[in-house]
Image (cartoon, rainbow, N blue to C red):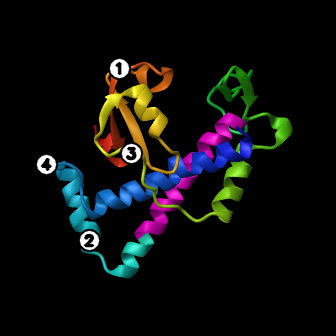
Amino acid sequence: MTRSDFVKALKNQTSDAAFFGTKQNLEQPPGRKPREQDVKLSAWYMGLGDSDRESVDAAMLEAAELAVFSFLCILDGVSTVENDSEKGELQLQYIRSGEVFRLNDPADGLLHDAYNDVCREFPPAPPERSEARVYEVAPASQLRKQQKYTDAMDLHAVSPIASRSGDDSPAISLPKNEHRKL
């Protein structure tokens, strides 16, 4: 995985998913018995005129992108998570088939700058259909193989390790916006 691949996938999995998931929640709160707060927000949002909804949408996208940008600033070391004068360093690694890739190597440029470039170059992309069906229950390792970074789906596993390790514990495939509400 290249740093560029990571930043594109990150944008899709975070700010794009947050924007489209929040918009979907505002248009139609999830669940058979949505939370009262979600119903109130939906009524407010749906009561807005088209121009006002577009302004809210733009503000939601800006907030989502700023949150990811700010997190990447922490990973890049240009924002801190410590109050001490001596600071540590965060290293982000991607490991696949035993090969280790450092994704936030300062020599390769800064992730927050690469993220801003991707945000300018690619407009928010709505989720694509996944091979995993919404609410499909199966072993976590099977569902994980079906996932795409563009599908805005998460695994909710019985075991917190199952979604990462290839464990065969049962899991359910959920839209991100609904997973957040659990």
For marks 1 and 2, the one nearer the N-term is 2
Q: Write down the residue under mark 3.
A: 176
Q: Tell me the CA gap for discs 1 and 3.
A: 20 Å
| Nearer mark to the viewer, of 4 and 1 | 1
User: Would you name the residue on which mark 1 appears?
Assistant: 169
Q: CA distance from mark 2 to mark 3?
A: 22 Å
Secondary structure category for the residue under label 2: helix
Q: CA distance from mark 1 to mark 2?
A: 40 Å
Q: Amino acid at mark 3?
A: Lys
- Is residue 92 highlighted in magenta? no
Cα separation, mark 4 vs mark 2, equals 18 Å
| Range of residues picked out in magenta | 56-76
Q: Secondary structure at mark 4?
A: loop
Q: Which residue position holds label 2?
A: 46
Could you tell me what secondary structure mostly forms the magenta stretch?
helix
Query: For mark 4, does the 10 Å Cα neighbourhood hold few (<14), some (14 to 19), or many (20 or more) residues?
Result: few
Q: Amino acid at mark 2?
A: Met
Q: For the point 65% across and 36% down, which residue is it?
A: 74
Cβ–Cβ under 8 Å for marks 2 and 3: no
* Of callouts 2 and 3, the N-terminal one: 2
Residue drawn at the location 37% of the way across and 56% of the way down = 22
Where 124 sits versus 32, above or below? below
Report the residue at 73% width, 42% height from top. Answer: 3
Whichever of labels 3 and 4 marks the residue nearer the N terminus, that label is 4
Is residue 66 rendered magenta in the image?
yes
